[in-house]
Image: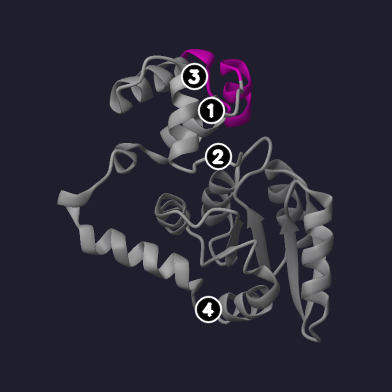
């Protein structure tokens, strides 16, 4: 049996994913987590064969979790599960170390196959994710967008600021100082040509970086 960790902050989503997974005869859910820190703890305590991680969770977000798991558990295949099909998320997830990338919309049809494939050592990307990566390659350096200029941490801070998190909350989530968060904020405003948090929020919504 392939033991799976499901990490998503919505219990109804986890319940739905569990039902999908357990319809198979070779996969079982051995652990669940509702936030990033619990996901890392469950990996340590339960030792799953595959981790399915939502990209938008409280505390540590999915990209941060994937990055930490890649360092501490390099042999653990991780599938990123998300509402987002945008290129930025696909690229950042793969760069962080994800072996799979599927959307919640495609999960009913693709999750089981994705788990089996990454467990075998191969990658699994939805058609949309594959297309997003192909577009990135086709554009090359000359076609880089404004978002491409942001580091993964800057993108994470941008998302949290856009969702209304305070500097203190962001600092606690990423174990950095409030001053460092303020530095990221100033850098974001400069890079994006924006003036305040309200404009950051509008930018994030327009670029589909947060769910509305």
Q: Secondary structure at mark 2?
A: loop
For the stretch drawn in magenta, what is the main secondary structure?
helix
* Mark 4 and mark 1: Cα distance apart in space: 36 Å
First of labels 4, 1 by sequence position: 4
Residues in magenta, as a range: 166-179
State the mark number for residue 210: 2
User: Foreground mark, 4 or 1?
Assistant: 1
Above or below, 52 against 10 in this view is below
- Tag 2–tag 1 contact (CB < 8 Å): yes
Which residue in the protein does label 3 denote?
198
Q: Which numbered disc flags the more N-terminal residue, 1 or 3?
A: 1
Does residue 181 appear anywhere in the picture? no
Which residue is painted at 72% across and 66% down in the image? Answer: 48
Q: Which sits in the foreground, 159 or 201?
A: 201
Mark closer to the chain start, 2 or 1: 1
Distance in Å between CA atoms under marks 1 and 3: 8 Å
Residue 172 included in the magenta stretch of the image = yes
Which quadrant would residue 77 be assigned to in this image?
bottom right
Residue topped by disc 1: 162
Which residue is rendered at x = 49% and y = 30% of the image? 157
């Amino acid at each position: 049996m392939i033991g799976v960790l499901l990490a998503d902050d919505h219990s109804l989503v986890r319940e739905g994913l569990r039902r999908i997974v357990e319809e198979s005869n070779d996969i079982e859910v051995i652990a669940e987590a509702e936030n990033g820190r619990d996901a890392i703890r469950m990996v340590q305590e339960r030792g799953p064969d595959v981790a399915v991680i939502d990209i938008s969770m409280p505390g540590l977000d999915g990209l941060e979790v994937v990055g930490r798991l890649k360092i501490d558990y390099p042999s653990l295949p991780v599938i990123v599960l998300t509402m987002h099909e945008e290129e930025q998320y696909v690229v950042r997830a793969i760069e962080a170390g994800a072996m799979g990338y599927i959307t919640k919309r495609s999960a009913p049809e693709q999750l089981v196959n994705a788990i089996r494939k990454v467990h075998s050592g191969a990658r699994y990307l939805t058609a949309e994710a594959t297309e997003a990566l192909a577009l990135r390659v086709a554009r090359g350096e000359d076609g880089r967008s404004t978002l491409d200029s942001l580091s993964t941490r800057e993108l994470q801070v941008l998302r949290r600021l856009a969702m209304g998190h305070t500097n203190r909350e962001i600092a606690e989530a990423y174990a950095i100082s409030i001053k460092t968060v303020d530095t990221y904020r100033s850098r974001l405003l400069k890079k994006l040509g924006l003036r305040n948090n309200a404009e950051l929020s509008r930018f994030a919504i327009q670029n589909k970086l947060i769910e509305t």
